[in-house]
Amino acid sequence: MTSATASPRQVAERLLRAVTGPDPGDIADCYAPEVVIEMPFAVAPLYPARIETTREELRARFRAGAAVRRYTRLTDVTIHETTGPGVVIAEYELHGHLASTAEPFSQRFVMVMTVRDGQIVHTRDYTNPITGARLLGKMPELLAVLGASEPAQPA
């Protein structure tokens, strides 16, 4: 089976194996040359809610991320096949440790993937932005952004 003939489920399974593999850059091999990644729970300006990027930019980003955190295992993996063309949903908990302190962490994800020709062309990634900010050492920035928000006025 070539990557072009891989089903969306097989692509999701390959992606999840790569996440804990020896070279974080290998994760990028699951993506198309150009990809859109949406993160509806992202907190601007810490991270954009939508990026259009390339496989090689992702490869560099994944490898750079290994300097901060290392993923070691996945648990609670469920892959949902859908009736949408090329759409598969992966739920999982990712475990690892921070590179600087070896402090363990876990982060739950739901990723909605659109796959064409055996490669991911679009994802919507849902995860806890507080846990993400902590892992990236950006809690002060997150708190500043949240503290600067105007409270909602009652209608």
Image (cartoon, helix red, strand yellow):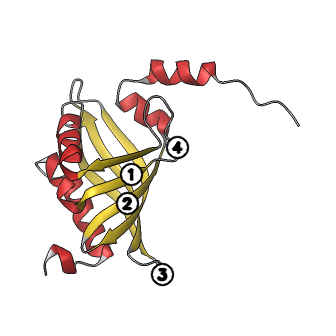
Name the residue beneath numbered marker 2: 122
Sequence order check, earlier mark of 1 and 3: 1
**Residue 143 in picture, x, y percent from top left:** 53, 21
| 123 relative position to 53: left or right | right
Name the residue beneath numbered marker 4: 41
Q: Secondary structure beneath disc 1?
A: strand
Which amino acid type is marked by label 1? Ile
Q: Is residue 60 above or below residue 122?
A: above
Q: CA distance from mark 2 to mark 4?
A: 16 Å
Q: Secondary structure beneath disc 3?
A: loop
Q: Secondary structure beneath disc 2?
A: strand
Q: How many marks are shown on the rendered structure?
A: 4
Which amino acid type is marked by label 4? Phe
Q: Is residue 53 above or below residue 3?
A: above
Q: Secondary structure beneath disc 4?
A: loop
**Residue 43 in picture, x, y percent from top left:** 51, 34
Q: CA distance from mark 2 to mark 3?
A: 16 Å
Name the residue beneath numbered marker 3: 83
Which residue is at the front of the view, 1 or 99? Answer: 1
Q: Residue at x 29, y 30 (%)?
A: 103
Give the crowd class for mark 4: few <14, some 14-19, many >=20 residues within 10 Å. Answer: some
Which residue is at the front of the view, 44 or 13? Answer: 44
| Furthest residue toward left | 22
Does the residue at mark 2 contact the one at mark 3 (Cβ under 8 Å)?
Answer: no
Q: Quadrant of residue 67?
A: top left
Name the residue beneath numbered marker 1: 37
Which amino acid type is marked by label 3? Thr
Q: CA distance from mark 4 to mark 1?
A: 12 Å
Q: Mark 1 or mark 3: which is in front?
A: 1
